[in-house]
Image (spheres, rainbow, N blue to C red):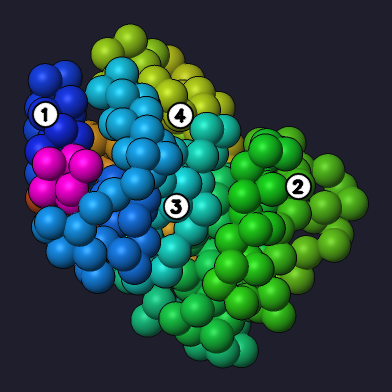
Amino acid sequence: MVTAALKKKIRRILEDSGIDCAEFETEQLLKWSLGENYYITGFDGEIDGGREKTLTEAAIRRARGEPLQYILGEWDFYGYTFKVSEGVLIPRQETELLAEKTLPYINESSTVIDLCSGSGCIPIAIAKESGAKCIGVEISREAINYFNENIRLNNIEDNVRAMEGDVLNPKRELLEALPKADLITANPPYLTAEEMQSLQREVRHEPEIALYGGRDGLDFYRRIFERWKPILKPDGIFAVEVGDEQSGPVTEIMESKGFKCKAFRDYGGTERVVLGEIQEKTAKQRPISP
Ligand code: GLN
């Protein structure tokens, strides 16, 4: 079959299953399957039967609702490539805002701790951009395997380290092994019980542990600021991604833990990142015990 005909066939499979960006996804699948040949063979280049079969099977998986990113096995975040597949959250474009808004606060002599790292996209992008030393804490073994692979893939072994741990109940040994941080970042699970009931079919393939943040989605925020603030330097920054309509409640939680906060909107206009500085005044204003 020639490229043009195969492309038409793949696009038809995607369109028939109601995929919105069928043209874009067809292109992505063709590039993935043909590699450099995609640019070389041209539209009338002949595609061998094996490739046609692989590509058709991939299109069928996609038509059944598997995320494109899992089929391709990798996805870009902040201009870097990350391995992803079933078992790890796909890096989202809006999460780039978290990296972007925290970068001005750090440099190559900074230490950054990222909580709930998943694929490692946040600490790896931050380390690549700033030269800072980054440590990512992640609970899932499966995700840590991707995280470590992504550290190697991005040649950032000297600056990024993945550590296994539960950010809600960090072990003493973990806390003691960590240096004090200039910046703590987190994109914790924040979807509500209601949102979990109406997930897009693609998102249903992603690990629940990376998505579900308790009934109102705020479980992690209620606990991480207090747990992790002792690891932050006095002039440190704590920055988190939040779900739709969570920036108000998260700011309130953070402020009650002694942070002075500001929120940043993503490209869709939603307040997506809340960034807090430790408010010295809180400590000073605290009544002195007799
Ligand atoms: N942004 C993801 C979604 O909307 C959720 C990721 C998270 O819970 N941190 O599907």
Q: Is residue 78 positioned above or below 239 on the image? A: below
Mark 3–mark 4 distance (CA, rounded to whole Å): 14 Å
Of pointers 2 and 1, the one earlier in the residue sequence:
1
Q: What separation in Å lies between label 3 and label 1 (alpha carbons)? A: 24 Å
Q: What residue type is labelled 4?
A: Glu
Whether residues under marks 3 and 1 lie with C-beta atoms below 8 angstroms apart, the answer is no
Earlier in the chain: of badge 2 and badge 3, it is 3
Instruction: Residue 169: tell me if it is visible.
Output: yes
Q: What residue type is labelled 2?
A: Glu
Q: What stretch is highlighted in magenta?
A: 1-6
The quadrant of the picture occupied by the N terminus is: top left
Crowd band around label 2 with a 10 angstrom C-alpha radius: few (<14), some (14–19), many (20+): some
Q: Which of marks 4 and 2 is nearer the N terminus?
A: 2
Residue located beneath label 3 in the image: 74
Query: First in sequence: mark 3 or mark 1?
Result: 1
Residue at disc 4, CB closer than 8 Å to ligand 1: yes
In the image: residue 54, left or right of residue 172 = left
Residue on which the image places disc 2: 164
Which mark identifies residue 206? 4
Quick one: label 3, few (<14), some, or many (20+) residues within 10 Å? some
